[in-house]
Image (cartoon, rainbow, N blue to C red):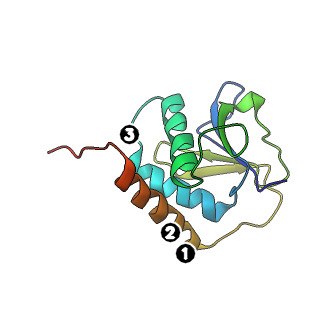
Amino acid sequence: MGNRAVITPRVGDTAPVVYLHWNGGLASVKGFLWAARFVIPAGSPEERMDAFAKLVAEYFFDTQVDRLTVYRETYGRSDTDNYDNGVYVIDEDWKIRQRLHNRYGEEIDQEKSIAIAQQIMDRWWRESDYVQPN
């Protein structure tokens, strides 16, 4: 089945979401969000969620944004009540502000969150075209 979750900046049929089929627990999602704070630039919610999906897919799962592991869609088309981790509603600073449809206990593991964020940022730093401004 998976360990599914939906991550979104707002609730509503047209809201942009990233759907995770795997690693949707709180410890993983916090790691993904921590990394996003450092590497995703400002932009529209859609642009930011596109970049977030790409960041997680490429730098954590070593895959592309697809319909199997990580994908982008709208809230109205997403499996928000997925019987796993439900929905994480985030703010502009990549912090979790609300949880919806979460039926189980939280996966709280700070070391795992830090390791995931570090893995993503290390790989992003090595492989990205980022040029630091002077």
Question: Residue 73, relative to residue 80: is it above or below?
Answer: above
Location of the C terminus (image quadrant): top left
Residue 133, position as x, y percentages in the image: 19, 43
Q: Locate residue 72: give its quadrant.
A: top right
Q: Residue at x 47, y 28 (%)?
A: 44
47 or 71, nearer to the observer: 71
Q: Secondary structure at mark 3?
A: loop
Per the rendering, the mark at residue 131 is: none
Q: Residue at x 59, y 50 (%)?
A: 97
Q: Amino acid at mark 2?
A: Ile
Q: Residues within 10 Å of mark 1 (few under 14, many from 20)?
A: few
Relative to 121, 59 lies left or right: right
Q: Dots 1 and 2: beta carbons under 8 Å?
A: yes
Q: Secondary structure at mark 2?
A: helix
Residue 42, position as x, y percentages in the image: 39, 36
- Residue identified by numbered label 1: 111
- Residue identified by numbered label 2: 114
Relative to 100, 103 lies left or right: right
**Residue extending furthest toward the left:** 134
